[in-house]
């Protein structure tokens, strides 16, 4: 009886141990699988994060980037490439020629080989808006020097091209503006030296012409220096609260003789407004605008200075005349350097062609803007805005009670 009982007990113990180990193994297996699943999820998350970061960097590049396969089809293109070529949908899978419709790019890619693995070229994109690109292309080879595709990088040169053209135009305009008074000064001086100085009447007339052109040269050089300082940011604004009405009143008084010579009436309708600005620069802006209104407005007309407080925390000042007005196509260009609506009349009046450009730079340096409203035959009104001065803090009167 002892052995069967012992055997049964041993078998029961073995079964219990087996069941215990199976349960523990299942728990260990479940824990291992859960740990592996968490690790795989973590790896997938890191991989997705890395892909997202790469995509973010790729799409945030200021250069357009395209990867082509061996057949010339687009495998990868960033957002900037789509923007440069105005592609509304995904370009992957399309050929470069189909996507851009520029045979110059296809020729650039086709010309790459093992002896010339890289090349660059400047291109102007077709369309009404001027846009220039510099394209750098490089062939991609594997370790066995077999070509696998092409990488193209597009740099937008539009701003540089415009700056280069503006610089060339500026140099040409300055040369032209300097040449005219210098030629007159030289011509009249040579005539005086050849004997005209002996005739007092002719000598006086010639000397007056020389003096007038020398003054024109002086004004032109001063305006050029002002433009240069404004564009380079070397001028530091002395910001303070500037009461506009008394400033305009003094300006009208200073211009009264010049306005009287043309029979022009100056009217100061500026309310009590104050701007946060440099008073000397504000005076320069108003002087240019009032001077232009007197010179190019109607003879025996009226020039009116007005102002108001805008809702955007700015004050708006305007100078209006009742002259011939400005055509619509010229209203944006009048603020360009050396742009003249009537070149002959402008030079006759002694203008340098830089006054409104100086006005624009000064106003923009204050954080404001300048614009013009005009109708042909109904006068012009030049507006500019400046930051409004903060209200003055109230002054507290501390009265001392007399001692009893």
Image (tube, rainbow, N blue to C red):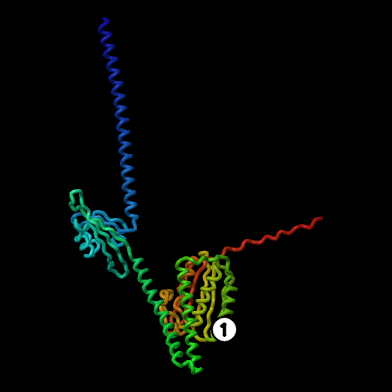
Q: Position of residue 228 (x, y in %)?
A: 45, 70
Q: Identify the image quadrant of residue 188.
A: bottom left
Q: Position of residue 220 (x, y in %)?
A: 46, 77
Q: Position of residue 380 (x, y in %)?
A: 47, 79
Query: For the C terminus, which image quadrant?
Result: bottom right
Closer to the camera in the image, 9 or 172: 172
Which residue sits at x=43%, y=74%? Answer: 335
Q: Is residue 159 above or below residue 77?
A: below
Query: For the N terminus, which image quadrant?
Result: top left
Which residue sits at x=48%, y=75%? Answer: 222
Q: Is residue 172 above or below residue 392?
A: below
Q: Is residue 190 above or below residue 12?
A: below
Q: Is residue 226 visible?
A: yes
Farthest residue, direction top = 1
Q: Residues within 10 Å of mark 1 (few under 14, many from 20)?
A: few
In the picture, measured across the screen, residue 339 lies left or right of residue 150, that is: right
In the picture, measured across the screen, residue 238 lies left or right of residue 96, that is: right
Which residue sits at x=33%, y=39%? Answer: 42
Check disc 1 and report the residue beneath it. 257
Q: Is residue 296 visible?
A: no
């Amino acid at each position: 009886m002892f052995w069967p009982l012992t055997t049964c007990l041993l078998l029961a113990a073995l079964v219990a141990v087996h069941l215990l180990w199976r349960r523990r193994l299942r728990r260990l297996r479940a824990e291992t699988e859960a740990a592996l699943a968490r690790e795989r999820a973590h790896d997938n998350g890191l991989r997705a994060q890395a892909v997202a970061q790469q995509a973010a960097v790729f799409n945030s590049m200021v250069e357009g980037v395209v990867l082509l396969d061996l057949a010339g089809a687009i495998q990868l293109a960033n957002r900037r490439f789509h923007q440069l070529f105005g592609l509304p949908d995904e370009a992957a899978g399309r050929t470069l020629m189909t996507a851009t419709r520029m045979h110059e790019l296809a020729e650039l890619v086709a010309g790459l080989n093992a002896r010339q693995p890289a090349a660059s070229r400047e291109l102007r994109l077709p369309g009404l808006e001027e846009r220039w690109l510099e394209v750098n292309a490089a062939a991609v080879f594997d370790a066995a020097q077999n070509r696998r595709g092409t990488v193209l990088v597009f740099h937008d040169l539009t701003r540089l091209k415009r700056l280069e053209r503006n610089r060339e135009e500026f140099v040409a305009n300055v040369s032209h503006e300097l040449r005219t008074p210098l030629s007159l000064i030289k011509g009249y001086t040579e005539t005086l030296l050849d004997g005209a100085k002996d005739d007092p009447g002719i000598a006086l007339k010639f000397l007056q012409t020389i003096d007038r052109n020398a003054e024109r040269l002086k004004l032109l050089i001063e305006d050029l220096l002002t433009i240069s300082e404004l564009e380079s940011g070397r001028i530091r604004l002395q910001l303070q609260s500037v009461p506009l009405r008394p400033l305009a009143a003094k300006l009208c008084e200073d211009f009264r003789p010049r306005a009287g010579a043309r029979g022009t009436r100056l009217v100061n309708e500026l309310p009590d407004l104050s701007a946060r600005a440099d008073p000397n620069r504000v005076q320069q802006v108003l002087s240019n605008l009032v001077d232009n209104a007197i010179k190019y407005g109607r003879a025996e007309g009226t020039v009116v200075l007005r102002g108001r407080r805008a809702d955007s925390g700015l004050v708006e000042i305007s100078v209006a005349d009742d002259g011939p007005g400005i055509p619509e196509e010229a209203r944006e260009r009048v603020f360009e350097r050396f742009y003249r609506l009537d070149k002959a009349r402008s030079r006759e009046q002694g203008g340098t062609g830089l006054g409104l450009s100086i006005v624009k730079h000064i106003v923009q340096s204050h954080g404001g803007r300048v614009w013009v409203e005009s109708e042909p035959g109904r006068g012009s009104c030049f507006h500019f805005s400046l930051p409004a001065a903060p209200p003055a803090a109230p002054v507290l009167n501390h009265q001392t009670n007399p001692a009893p």
